[in-house]
Image (spheres, coloured by chain):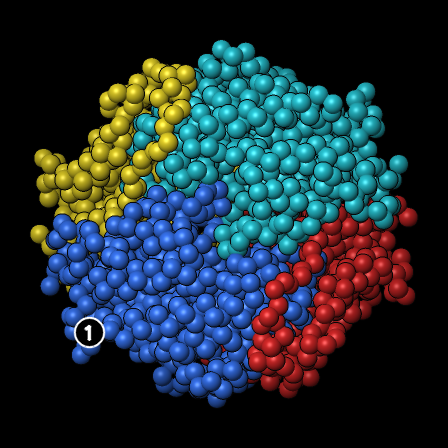
Chain colours: A yellow, B cyan, C red, D blue
Amino acid sequence: MEFFKDIAQVSYEGPESKNPFSFKFYNPEEVVEGKKMKDHLRFSVAFWHTFTGDGRDMFGAPAFDRPWDKYEDPLDRSFARVDALFEFCEKLNLEFFCFHDRDIAPEGVTLRETNKLLDKVVGYIKDRMKGSNLKLLWGTANLFSNPVYSQGAATSPFPEIFARAAAQVKKALEITKELDGQGYVFWGGREGYETLLNTNMELELRNLAHFLKMAVEYAQKIGFNGQLLIEPKPKEPTKHQYDFDVANSLAFLKTYGLDSHFKFNIEANHSTLAGHTFVHELRYARIHGKLGSIDANQGDLLLGWDTDQFPTNIYETTLAMYEVIKAGGFTKGGLNFDAKVRRSSFKLQDLVIAHIVGMDTFALGFKVAYRMWKDQVLEKFIEDRYRGYSEGIGKKIASGETSFEELESLVIDKDEFVLHSGQQEYLESLLNQYLFTVVKG
Amino acid sequence: MEFFKDIAQVSYEGPESKNPFSFKFYNPEEVVEGKKMKDHLRFSVAFWHTFTGDGRDMFGAPAFDRPWDKYEDPLDRSFARVDALFEFCEKLNLEFFCFHDRDIAPEGVTLRETNKLLDKVVGYIKDRMKGSNLKLLWGTANLFSNPVYSQGAATSPFPEIFARAAAQVKKALEITKELDGQGYVFWGGREGYETLLNTNMELELRNLAHFLKMAVEYAQKIGFNGQLLIEPKPKEPTKHQYDFDVANSLAFLKTYGLDSHFKFNIEANHSTLAGHTFVHELRYARIHGKLGSIDANQGDLLLGWDTDQFPTNIYETTLAMYEVIKAGGFTKGGLNFDAKVRRSSFKLQDLVIAHIVGMDTFALGFKVAYRMWKDQVLEKFIEDRYRGYSEGIGKKIASGETSFEELESLVIDKDEFVLHSGQQEYLESLLNQYLFTVVKG
Amino acid sequence: MEFFKDIAQVSYEGPESKNPFSFKFYNPEEVVEGKKMKDHLRFSVAFWHTFTGDGRDMFGAPAFDRPWDKYEDPLDRSFARVDALFEFCEKLNLEFFCFHDRDIAPEGVTLRETNKLLDKVVGYIKDRMKGSNLKLLWGTANLFSNPVYSQGAATSPFPEIFARAAAQVKKALEITKELDGQGYVFWGGREGYETLLNTNMELELRNLAHFLKMAVEYAQKIGFNGQLLIEPKPKEPTKHQYDFDVANSLAFLKTYGLDSHFKFNIEANHSTLAGHTFVHELRYARIHGKLGSIDANQGDLLLGWDTDQFPTNIYETTLAMYEVIKAGGFTKGGLNFDAKVRRSSFKLQDLVIAHIVGMDTFALGFKVAYRMWKDQVLEKFIEDRYRGYSEGIGKKIASGETSFEELESLVIDKDEFVLHSGQQEYLESLLNQYLFTVVKG
Amino acid sequence: MEFFKDIAQVSYEGPESKNPFSFKFYNPEEVVEGKKMKDHLRFSVAFWHTFTGDGRDMFGAPAFDRPWDKYEDPLDRSFARVDALFEFCEKLNLEFFCFHDRDIAPEGVTLRETNKLLDKVVGYIKDRMKGSNLKLLWGTANLFSNPVYSQGAATSPFPEIFARAAAQVKKALEITKELDGQGYVFWGGREGYETLLNTNMELELRNLAHFLKMAVEYAQKIGFNGQLLIEPKPKEPTKHQYDFDVANSLAFLKTYGLDSHFKFNIEANHSTLAGHTFVHELRYARIHGKLGSIDANQGDLLLGWDTDQFPTNIYETTLAMYEVIKAGGFTKGGLNFDAKVRRSSFKLQDLVIAHIVGMDTFALGFKVAYRMWKDQVLEKFIEDRYRGYSEGIGKKIASGETSFEELESLVIDKDEFVLHSGQQEYLESLLNQYLFTVVKG
């Protein structure tokens, strides 16, 4: 069945096009620095939002009436959603997708039954992938929707629930390998607490570490070579989640000797919920060698929950792509649209347009970032600003070869210290100049 | 000169007293578990807020007219403030104080001159300490007020500023040792950034690590045995500070191999600015063996800046003291009132009453916490909740001796999983019962 | 059928009772100032949270397994929920309840069918009320769950939806009258916008005013004498809701000449989401003669969404009840627990305990507030602070009988202005003293 | 004396210019719709930030070393600052400025003395204005810096302080008239409370109303024809300010019958501190006929205080200018840069560049907004979306000519309701297309 039959193949028509179903800034085949745009950006669709999402919110019933959800039989519905995925990605030139185990297949009464259902859908996906460009960016297990996880999964107070979560991740790793996934993500949506009054944080964190260690071992055992990724989020659904932000998660990984096995999947909206900018989290991960992949979306900074909007702010995408460029580009990661159309954008057309604006926004951001990088304007500014650390006492400081005594002797009798302006307004002006002239050429 | 001559010695008069200048809940000499209340609580006055603070805010000029600030000569003013400190602490049974180098003495043109002035005041303090119970809880260096630090101190782009900060900390460590301080605090008020556009975060963090390493070495060299402490704060004055919260700081310390040398000085208001509860930060530090000392104040969760109010919320102090009790009590740390009277509370009487309410609030919190601890009500609840991890497969999980395969085999055919209620409302009710009955006896 | 058969009648056992199913502070029959506690407090249960709520959240499936939801037939389920309501309220001495039209009865295909179903349930409730003390505090219409309202109800861009909302409110007013409701609430959960890009705010606000005007007219026409109430909330589910806070709503009512017909139903959690304290909203409504009723719950100020927790913070309830006392007590309003048990508190026992802690917290708050009021400690302080306005030029200012020229003449040559301390810390200390001694008696 | 002698006259050089001291997007003389850009935008410099600001923050001493502050004598310093103002505005083509009374002149011991000093400076400004294009956008009185206002000015508990504030506003109105100011602003920086425990909100609000009424009367009396403006801000410096946002202020004005005399001066950063977008506040004011003037700056949504940054975000300026265009453009208002350079941007060059980026950002925003307006793309979309209200029952709803009964009759038997998509993502995409193609032409 064809679901998007009213929508033609989406292609690049340039910034002046009046066709909403065209790319204005994203030209997948355009070559930048010897690589196609699509290979720089590695866009991915999120199965859950786009094919399973129903438009429900905390105050409202499902609002989307998807044609693939017409099927009575749950398994038929799953197959239809997979069909929709492939059709959608082809129309939009999307070459990656991501999923949770429970998005793609229905649950049975036992895990064994559930796994069988999962295998059927995975088999179907695998078949469909053969004649397609579509690849799996990463897989993950949903350890938060089922009420058995209401008090945590790997941090549940109940060993049976821990075991159930383990079994679920075991299977999720297997199917991610089966589908040749380039990564596997851990998002601890219930790994945290509602109140400290009833929480043994120490035991929960240690158990979480044991859980991840077993996951590493099992991934190695089955020969899964994808990148393991932690996705930080500070709160929601729980009051406090242990993977609060990149640094919190890094502290955890280091405490339990797990840091060499993981990188981070950084989400824009999760960053701001933690009180950081998106670019801060990317920068922090990058300089620690931990920038793995990106959940490309956008939050509303005046709202305190995960709005998961499609990214449309080019300031954000430019600064984000600048970090990706500095990190040497994506290897196993990509830009996954962990984003959902607004509840009032309930048409299939809205799904398509939302992805277009997300892709255009990142493509334009990439182009601006690339031009800034090529011109080395920020790099030169920063090099100049910190030049003092490349020679003399600055160099000794930067390499850790001096002492308080030596440093004191240099300044104890100085009566003036010279600073240079940080020139923030100039740099912001420069960024605007890059942003608002790049399209011309 | 006597500054608080209108105020009599403050003593315990019990909860029904109508005398504002009496303790209602804090009885310093009362013995709990073989130790006096004052030794459990180790209250400390913050020199900067109480004796240097002038009531200025971002929109308003100094509003306090302190008698000790009448002196024209800066050094005389410093001596007068020290006199005020000793008088104040005696009247209030306060046995500790904390200071920044620049609070207690004026600056000269060069650091050498400044150090000389500092030595004079330190000598004076030392003399006054001889006939007094007053001790130094911790010292610190002010690396944020002087405009030379406007772009950072240990993270300045300019080596000379880094050196200046080093020289200042060197001296601050020396005087803290001289005054037998039980700790030394690093608060990185400008160690962060205003914009990432002009920031080399990698170099700044590495330099900061070198700085702290030199501090550790110098402290060891001069035989300073106090506890070194990091005080996290997420933002303000800078847009983003590296020591964002306890976990961020721990990640940093671990990255640079510094974690064995530091504990944390945790401030209530800084915790909430970082999006955590105060008790969360204490709990997190405690289970990592890093709970060093406390900056006892209170923020306004509807305001986005450091209001540094005197603590009056007994929920907060009860939960905080519960963590301190579980940590085995303070060793080198204490409860430092990093708190300031409101700008409209400009009288000397307000200074006294503000400390009284702070001390009463923590004393009552301690009593409630201690009774809960003695009754083991929370401990038993938690032990019961996590009982599954003390035997069978739960024990194997908790000790890291199982695998995904073993765990899967246990649950793959289960069709029901049993959870127990988290009973948050019951525990909150229990807390209220403890809070509102403890005074009776 | 008996749903709470394991739970005995809940009664007052005093603060030392170890029985979780007893009141510690709330003694319904205790007489204060000639009126029973229960008549001061007028507690109400929220049908939706307690009998319809299923524990779902944005990341999780329903987690509650209520015995009254076992019935296959929707109407039977509705009757069972009503039975549960009456049993629950009897056990807990709750004398009021509140509902939305859609909580209590299922929907049919057309409104006519839906209304018939509603009539059946309303008839059943009315019958059950005859042999019971249970009364209706207020009714309301759910204009937010059904996807037809996803773009607004009275502010929908589509007249048919506006008409549908009107028809629904018409019926809800009728049944509220039928059940002798003391009030009727308007909560505009979708009356706002997701983005200004597609919004005609002017037309939407005017339509909303027309809607409310028609509601007033219809209420008068059918002889409904209950109080009409607006319930402000700033955001969630929409990005921005027009009834942002009490003042925003008041501006709206005044702009359209509607203010004489409405008071406010003020919710604690909505207040803090708007950046105000709960007591601020109560105070503001009170001094404008608009304090109608209260949605008694508690938010988490570190979270950005409506957590609707049961109220357990006695500071909040004391200050809230102080405003109610100053307003002369409730007339047609009451304390409705618009609160839900945590998702992990999934047992029926938790429902009971949660209401107990809510009632105890407000009862204790009331007692403390009442004692403060009786002692007039705050009143006298404030009277004293503003005494200047009771005589001389102050009196002329307060009655609007002076001019800039006269005022200037009084101060133009003054060289000193005397202020008195605001004594915030003293007042906070006093509040603590009241809080922590009231239980004694 | 020439202060900016190293800086040449700033002129338009186009988006590709590498000269930081040139306009990239703002061409003052360019004609749009028959009016010059400079007359559309009416840029104004804020005297306080640019000429009085010293770079102090809550944790740091003054960091700016302005040449005009070299003068020992306060009055000489004031004259020098005025000289700097005129020189700066000429170099930057700025045709308006704004001031507080206390920015421009020093204080004497009494108000009479202060007024004399003020008159001297005002006289000097008036002289300088004769040979210049510089005009006064608005004046205001600083009722927040002096500690006498620490507990409020028009809401002070002390009548003498109220009188002092009145005298100050009287004079400020006089000098604003003297300098032919086009407006006069009331920002109630201390009109609010720190704690409700000591506050008589009712009396304070009534006094504030009396104060404003006297201001209106005095303005009329002296023949001041400028627009009176309220500038809302929710908090900071006080915990809660009465003029929380536009709607709160409007409710106040309406309650006291003052609304016909005032419009609003809306600040971007104040809007977001109140939980609104900048454009929301503009839109709300506009549709109530109250959009008076704009304080053009930018906040940091992750920080909870007024950062007053120069505006650089073109999304914001585009949406803001769109509202201004819809309002028919500025009449007596303008775009006042209530913005300060970052503390580390301490050079005179930074002052210039900061204003350039602010002007460029608003100019580009205006151009984009104007093109969207000319194309009527949003207008047509919205017209279409709400088309139902232009005919039939929709028209009756929109004009308030129907009833609940009539509306019910239309829908009671309907079994389907049709909605159209809100198309938010499409509109965001369209905005990006306008933003990133406008520069080309």
Q: Is residue A295 left or right of residue C166?
A: left
Tell me which corner region of the image, top left, top right, bottom left or bottom right, holds residue D310: bottom left
Q: Secondary structure at mark 1?
A: strand
Residue under numbered circle 1? D36
Viewer-side residue, A189 vs D4: D4
Residue B304, can we see it? yes
Q: Is residue A289 above or below residue D341?
A: above
Chain for mark 1?
D
Residue A96, can we see it? no
Q: Is residue B23 left or right of residue C341?
A: right
**How far across and down, in percent of the image, does residue C4 sit?**
76, 48
Q: Which residue corresponds to the image point at 43% horizontal and 83% vertical from the top-left?
A: D224
Tell me which corner region of the image, top left, top right, bottom left or bottom right, holds residue A122: top left
Q: Is residue B171 left or right of residue C317?
A: left
Q: Which residue corresponds to the image point at 62% horizontal and 56% vertical from the top-left?
A: D194
Viewer-side residue, A109 vs B128: B128
Label 1 neighbour load within 10 Å: few <14, some 14-19, many 20+: some
Q: Which residue corresponds to the image point at 80% horizontal and 30% vertical from the top-left?
A: B28
Q: Is residue C137 left or right of residue A251?
A: right
